[in-house]
Each structure stands twice: as structure tokens, then as C-alpha cells.
């Protein structure tokens, strides 16, 4: 099968790696890809979605998989479908579940899906009045896309009001913050759950936990994610069933009623409070770095799952996972997440330990290839993934792989999966 993958990060690299490991051989294309995706296929430079759809049609691309949120919110799925192409991801209208936090919170309220008390507003006065009714900490969210960084957890009322002021003035996140959601802080533990949907049916993948904060012990600023592990032992079948019944099913039914059936990945950020799952947010694509740890655990065909989801045929397949655990550790550049770093050459030691070679790998993200040399381009550079029969074994293998990677200014957390261990 000819498959096009949109995106350039570790998520897209991981999807490509999983597809490349299948028995059936596929021809892969990336737009734009990164300096390491050429290991699996051809990188394209066609930024206009209409041109890209024409390229896909002319080159008989049988499936397109959209990785990041921005193309989805921009309507790439609608454009490809108008050309009769098979594409995995939600329509522009359905992508509002991530594209607008206001839309998402109002949708949750309308369909009685458990979520935190909130207000959505463009009025600083309204936001301040609601803030005064809450007990700190207080959560302040920019309405639009902010690359996973548009959520502020204010430790007191003054901090919350500063965050609200800076968002509504456009200072913090530009146009993405001109409307805000202010909501109560929920005290519990956080989970990432992913449902692959075809508009009617869905497959719920093993629950993961990611580590958003830059530094050990969940200190420092929020990032796009510094590591993750799956499956988490904090979830039992009863909790999975509550998520199915109270969140996923009403969401799919609600989106059909809204005239925007949901196809693609529904990424549910959940806070478990006293055993009850509360919806923090929806995203409309795989999490990054959660995707990097879920892909190596899949034992059934990844490409078939994406294809059947894109053609409303999920009922026909059973998606299977190994009984193992996976841990991913993000290695970021020195100035992340504050600013871009200068490119730095990446040196990879030869892995001599057979166990590490067999049970760990690297998913590359912010990298470029120049004259055969791989460079770290800034941001989140790569993810080292370890797989094992226990979380500890998987974590140890991931960190052993991290020890084989060198570039100037490399930054990583040393406590990934500490919640489970």
C-alpha cells in the first residue's frame, strides 16, 4: 500500500516505524517528515493541501495519516475527501474539539459528559468574577491551539488574573488566547486515553501517563511532553468501562447529532478523582510522546487499523497489544521550551548490549540530515523507547538507550514513570 504521513515529529516517525515492521511491505511518503524519516520513505515539500491532494491522487496514495493537530483544524481531511482520497483524521468541524477549548467545554456540558466547572469568556471582568468563586489552584486555558502549552495552572488568584489578562490582551498566545476558559482545579491523577474512531465505532487503546513538566518531580514549565509510559497500572477494567460509557460513547453520539461524525483519534485527557473519570480536554490526534510508546506495543497491523478507521470498517478488525510495557524518555535541546537552540550534531554510540539493542529504539523528531550527518534542530529532538515485561525493565532499557545518544545541550528528565514505580 502507498501511504502518506503528514507531520514531522516523533509521533509520525513512530507510526512509520510500526508500519515498516509489518509483514506486508508498504511504500511511505512524508510531508514534510524530518531528517530521519528518509529511513522509511520519501520526504515531500508540498505545503498547499490542495496541491498535496492532487499529488496523492496522481501517485495513487491509498491512505493518508494526519499526525499533528494544525492540518486537521485547517481542514486537510475535507480537502482530501473532496478528491475522493482515503484519509485518517477528523473533519475541520469535528477537529474543533481540539481547535477550540470553548467549543469542547460547551460540547461536554451539552452532552452531560463529566468535566470541571468552568466559564468561557472574552470578558476580563467575567473571568475575574468567576476566578474569585474558585479555590486555588485555578486552571486558565487559551481557547485556540498553542502547541500543548496553552494551559496555566495558577497557584493563587493573583497568578490566575495575570494569566487571564495576558491571554485576553494577546500578549501570551496571540489570537489563540483572545477567548479563555477558566475552570476549577481537579485533584487526582491524570491519564491519557486514546480511542481510534470511525464515526460510529471505536477501539480504546491501553491507557498511558505522560509527563508534561520540564523538570524532575513535575517541576518547571509545561512542555509538549517529556516522557510517557503505557499501559499504566492505575487503570482497571471498571475505569475503562466508565470512560467508554460516560465519555467516548456520548461523544461519538453527540458529534453525529452535531452533524460532524468523529473519525480519527479521540485523545481524552482524564483526571481520575476518587475513582471517577473527569474529562480535562479532548485532542483530535495521537499524543506525542504517547504515540511513541503505544505503537511498539501493537501486535496487530497498524496500517490496517488506520485504513479500516478511515473507511468506517473498524467492526471488521480486532486490534491487539502485547502484554509488555513501554517507557519513552524525551531528549530535548538545551533551550527548550524557552527558545530554539542552535543545531547540534547528534552522535549515536554503537549499542553493544544485545538486550538493549533488541528491546529499545529511538524515535526521531526535531532533527535534520545535512551531508549525511544528523543534527538536533531544537525543541524535542528524539524519544528513547524501552520495552519490557515490567515498567521498571522498560524504563531501565529506555535510559540505557539515552546513554548512547550525545549532542550539545541535551536535556532530559531522569524520573519518567515514577508514578507507577
Image (cartoon, rainbow, N blue to C red):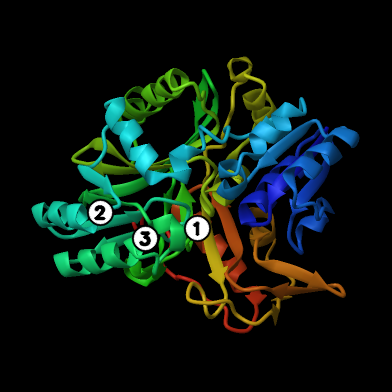
| SS state under label 3 | loop
- Dot 2 alpha-carbon crowd within 10 angstroms: few under 14, some 14 to 19, many 20 or more: some
What separation in Å lies between label 1 and label 3 (alpha carbons)? 25 Å
| Mark 1 or mark 3: whose residue is earlier in sequence | 1
- Dot 3 alpha-carbon crowd within 10 angstroms: few under 14, some 14 to 19, many 20 or more: some
What separation in Å lies between label 1 and label 2 (alpha carbons)? 24 Å
Q: Which quadrant holds the N terminus? A: top right
In the displayed orientation, state which residue is furthest to the right: 58
**Of the pair 141 and 382, the residue shown nearer to us:** 141
Reading the image, the residue beneath label 3 is: 418
Q: Position of residue 252 (x, y in %)?
A: 44, 23
| Mark 3 or mark 2: whose residue is earlier in sequence | 2
Name the residue rendered at 83%, 34% in the picture: 61
**Of the pair 243 and 312, the residue shown nearer to us:** 312
Q: Position of residue 85 (x, y in %)?
A: 76, 28
Reading the image, the residue beneath label 1 is: 147
| SS state under label 1 | loop
Left or right of 97 on screen, residue 370? right
Reading the image, the residue beneath label 2 is: 123
Tell whether label 2 touches label 3 (CB within 8 Å).
no
Amino acid at each position: 500500500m502507498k501511504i502518506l504521513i503528514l507531520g514531522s515529529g516523533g509521533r509520525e516517525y513512530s507510526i512509520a516505524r510500526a508500519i515498516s515492521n509489518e509483514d506486508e511491505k508498504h511504500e511511505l511518503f512524508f510531508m514534510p517528515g524530518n531528517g530521519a524519516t528518509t529511513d522509511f520513505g520519501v520526504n515531500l515539500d508540498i505545503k498547499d493541501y490542495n496541491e498535496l491532494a492532487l499529488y496523492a491522487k496522481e501517485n495513487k496514495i491509498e491512505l493518508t495519516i494526519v499526525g499533528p493537530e494544525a492540518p486537521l483544524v485547517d481542514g486537510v481531511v475535507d480537502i482530501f475527501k473532496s478528491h475522493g482520497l482515503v484519509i485518517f483524521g477528523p473533519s475541520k468541524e469535528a477537529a474543533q474539539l481540539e481547535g477550540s477549548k470553548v467549543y469542547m467545554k460547551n460540547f461536554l456540558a451539552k452532552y452531560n459528559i463529566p468535566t470541571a466547572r468552568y466559564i468561557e469568556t472574552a470578558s476580563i471582568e467575567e473571568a475575574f468574577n468567576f476566578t474569585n468563586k474558585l479555590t486555588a489552584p485555578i486552571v486558565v486555558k487559551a481557547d485556540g491551539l498553542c502547541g500543548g502549552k496553552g494551559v496555566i495552572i495558577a497557584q493563587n488568584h493573583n497568578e490566575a488574573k495575570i494569566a487571564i489578562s495576558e491571554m485576553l490582551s494577546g500578549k501570551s498566545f496571540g489570537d489563540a488566547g483572545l477567548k479563555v476558559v477558566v475552570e476549577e482545579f481537579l485533584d487526582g491523577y491524570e491519564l491519557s486515553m486514546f480511542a481510534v474512531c470511525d464515526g460510529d465505532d471505536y477501539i480504546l487503546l491501553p491507557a498511558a501517563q505522560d509527563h508534561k513538566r520540564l523538570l524532575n518531580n513535575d517541576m518547571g514549565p509545561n512542555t509538549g511532553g517529556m516522557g510517557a509510559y503505557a499501559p499504566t497500572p492505575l487503570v482497571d477494567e471498571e475505569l475503562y468501562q466508565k470512560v467508554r460509557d460516560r465519555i467516548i460513547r456520548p461523544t461519538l453520539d453527540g458529534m453525529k447529532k452535531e452533524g460532524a461524525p468523529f473519525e480519527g483519534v479521540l485523545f481524552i485527557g482524564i483526571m481520575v478523582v476518587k475513582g471517577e473519570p473527569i474529562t480535562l480536554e479532548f485532542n483530535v490526534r495521537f499524543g506525542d510522546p504517547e504515540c511513541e510508546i503505544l505503537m511498539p506495543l501493537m501486535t496487530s497491523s497498524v496500517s490496517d487499523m488506520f485504513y479500516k478507521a478511515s473507511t468506517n470498517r473498524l467492526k471488521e478488525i480486532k486490534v491487539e497489544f502485547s502484554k509488555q510495557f513501554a517507557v519513552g524518555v524525551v531528549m530535548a535541546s538545551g533551550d527548550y521550551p524557552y527558545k530554539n537552540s542552535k543545531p547540534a550534531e547528534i552522535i549515536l554510540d554503537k549499542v553493544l548490549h544485545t538486550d538493549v539493542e533488541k528491546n529499545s529504539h529511538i524515535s526521531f523528531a526535531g532533527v535534520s540530515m545535512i551531508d549525511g550527518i544528523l543534527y538536533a534542530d531544537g525543541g524535542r529532538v528524539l524519544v528513547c523507547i524501552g520495552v519490557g515485561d515490567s515498567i521498571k525493565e522498560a524504563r531501565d532499557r529506555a535510559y540505557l538507550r539515552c546513554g548512547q545518544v550525545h549532542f550539545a545541550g541535551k536535556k532530559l528528565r531522569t524520573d519518567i514513570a515514577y508514578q507507577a514505580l
